[in-house]
Structures are given as structure tokens and as C-alpha cells.
Amino acid sequence: MIKQYIKQALRMIGENKLLSVISILGTALAICMIMVIVILYVVNTASFKPEVNRGRTCYITTVMSNGKDDNRRISYSSLGLPLVKECCYPLKGAEAVTAINMDRYRPLTASSMDGLKNRTSYISYTDTAFWKIFQFNFLQGGPFSPAAFTSGIRDAVISESVALALFGTDQVVGREMKLDFIVYNICGVVKDVSRFASKAWAEVWIPYTVRDDGGYQEGINGSYSCCVLLKPGVTREELRTEALRKVEEFNAKTRDVKADILHQPSTQIEEWIGGGSEFGANLFYLYVRYGIILFILLLVPALNLSGITLSRMRRRMAELGVRRAFGATQGTILWQVTVREHGLDPARRTAGIGDVVRRHVVAEGLVAGHLAGEDGAFTGMFNGAVFIAAFLFCLVLNCFPPASRLGASSRLEYLRDSING
């Protein structure tokens, strides 16, 4: 009997090639899209090198300045360096605070000393605490020293790709390079950083003390953002209370304008969805929006599979009616069809699940392509829980519709057809 079921199942696959392909691809594409959404959420919120402390890092990236007397002349921008030094660096609830000046729209030209090789590179101006909050993989050398930072010495940490482009090797510590014709000494070489590490990413890192940037609006506005590593046991609300107190002390010293850090400091997920905006980040609507998207992506293949399965089962009414006429009980018919559809159609089930696995690997690979250069980055982005959930859902989705359709209306139709026959 089991052998006969297998033969019938294989014949059904051959007779319904188009429907089998549609059911496989429909399910696989939906699951693939769900996994892409989840993976993008993970890479923008989870910790991975060099941003290994995302879970306890807060961000102050935007400040609003307005007139003290009239609350007009409103200006939004990044933080000025004087505001950073007086309101962010002294925070007692912080284990470390770094200021970063990263202009993603105006890269500089890095070139070898003879000018024969050059590469357009993105520069990050920062401080020594940057290397404590973010953990880079140094291939050679190390970060610029506190003494070099304080003195404004032109030391630079470069990425592996920049080193290879300019010198053909990553063993370049102690050599010199030019950034827009200004000479810098290379003190360290790091592996390339993923662009998903939005705060740590750059291609060249140099001390911000090499240039004069005092900001404007009495030092409130400027081009810096701050990353604050919380001390163990300190909450974001406690840090915000302390930061607001520092801002009030700063405003007491200004003459004409005052600063407002809005809803900040922001957590990693709030920063990702716009924590530095005027209205802050609304996590509730974020989860509702993603929930609706996931529901629709799950509903479409479920309806698709149910319709295809019902259509296929209607074509078997005559066969099931004959079995019923020869004494088969409703339970026996339901069991036979369920066994055939669930357990003895291995080609279609394996193909569907295999296609989901393949698409999951492709989706992971697309994301991991942006993580090139980081040891274990691909492994870190491979979320086992997401993969298992998608795998199980695919399995259930492929198996559930036949049983559900046979459990009610179809069984009544079988009885009616067998009686009328």
C-alpha cells in the first residue's frame, strides 16, 4: 500500500508540474522576503565587529539651537565641539564617550608620496575613546596615541583596502601618505569595515585635533556626533537626566542662543529609525508596520497554496468516491490522503524546503557581501533562530492546506459524491 501511495504521488507531480513550481516558488519567495527583512533588522540593531557594544551604547547626533529670548532662529545640525566637550565628555554615567566627525558626502583623495597611486577615501575625524568603544581588527600597528591626539600630530589609521591600493601591501605602518596633499604618518592598518557599522565605518581615521573646528552658534552647532558607552548598571534614562543637566549648565553660559538635545540620548534601534529627529523614534509604529508587512508576506503564499491544493483535490473526487463506495471510512480516506500529501511527496517537499534554504543562503550572502573583511561576519549575521523559524514555517505551510481542506467541506463532498454515485 505504501509503495502504491509513492507511485501515485510521483505521478501527481508529473501531471501538475506548473502547479508544483508555483507552490514551491510562491512559498520560497515569501519566506525569502521575510528573512531579508529580519536579517536587515538584525544587522542594524545587533552587535558585531567593530560595533560590539551596541547593546549599551547611546547616541547624541542632533542638536537644536534657538534664541534665548524669542525661541526663534531655530537651527538643527550635528553637535559643535564645545558642546561635546562640556556636555558629553564629562558624563559620569558613561564608561567612554567618543566624538566623531564623518562627512559621507565629501571624501578626500588619499595618495602615495610619489603621487602615482591614489584612492578616493572617506575620512572619520575622531578621538582616542573611539578605539575603546569600537573593536577593530588591526592587521598591523595600532590606533593613534593620546599624546598624538592631544598634540594634533598627523597620524592615521587606514583600512586594508586603502593600504593595498596605495602600497600593494598591508604592512605599511611607519610609512607616509597624503590626504589632499597633506602628509600623514600611518600608525595602524585595520581590516575593512562593513557599511552596516554606520558609526565606526570609514576608510581612514585621523585625530580631529589636526584641524580647527569650533562650530557655530556659540559652539552649539557643528559637525560632530557622540557615541556614549554606558557604565554597567546605568540606564539610558539616568544618562539622559545627567545630559540634560549638563546642557542646562552649558546654556547658562551662552549669550544669545540655547541648546536642546531633543529626545536623545538614543538607543541603537532608535538611532536606526531616526532617534535624532525632532519627534524622536516611535518603536510601537515600527513594530506594527513590520508586523503588517510580515503578515501580508505570509498570507499570500498561504492563500496560494490553499487554492492550488483544493483545486488538485477536487480532481480526485471520483477516486475518493470509489474508495468510499468500497467501504473505506472517512477517517481512512483522510489518513491516506494526509499521508500521501505530507509524508509521501518527498520530491515536492524537499524541493520547496531546499529552495527556501538556497534563498536563505543567497539573502545571507547579499548581506554578508557588505560585511567583507570582518572575521566571522558571515557567521555572525547567520541567525539560526530566523533560519529555523523560516524552515519550520515552510514545512507547515506546504503540509497544512491539504489536511485543513479535507477536514470539513471536502469530506462532505466526498460523502455526497459517493452516495450519488
Image: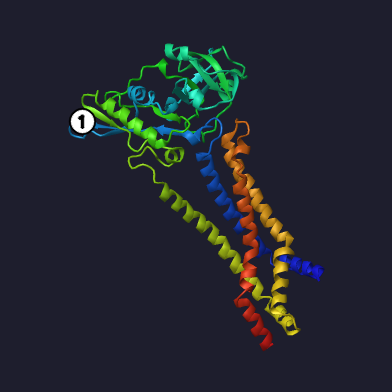
Quadrant of residue 394 within the rendered picture: bottom right
Relative image position of residue 89 (x, y in whole percent): 39, 23
Q: Is residue 30 positioned above or below 42 on the image? A: below
Q: Residue at x 56, y 18 (%)?
A: 142
* Quadrant, the N terminus: bottom right
Q: Is residue 411 above or below residue 210?
A: below
Question: How is the rendered protein coloured?
Answer: rainbow
- Residue lying at 59% horizontally and 40% vertically, measured from the top left: 381
Q: Is residue 77 visible?
A: no
**Within 10 Å of the Cα at label 1, are there few (<14), some (14-19), or many (20+) other Cα atoms?**
some
| Residue lying at the far bottom of the rendered structure | 420
Name the residue: 28% across, 30% down: 259
Residue designated by label 1:
68
Q: Quadrant of residue 400?
A: bottom right
| In the depicted structure, whether residue 247 falls above or below residue 208 | below
Q: Residue furthest front?
A: 233
Q: Quadrant of the C terminus?
A: bottom right
The count of marks equals: 1
Measured from the top left, where is residue 224 in percent x and y? 38, 27
Question: Which SS class for mark 1?
Answer: loop
x, y (%) of residue 135? 54, 27
- Identified by mark 1, the residue type is Lys
Using the image as rendered, state which of residue 305 and residue 248 is in the foreground.
Answer: 248
Q: Nearer the viewer, residue 167 or 406?
A: 406
Vertically, is 253 above or below 43? Answer: above
Inspect this view and state whether residue 21 appears. Answer: yes
16 on left or right of 179: right
Q: Residue at x 64, y 61 (%)?
A: 398
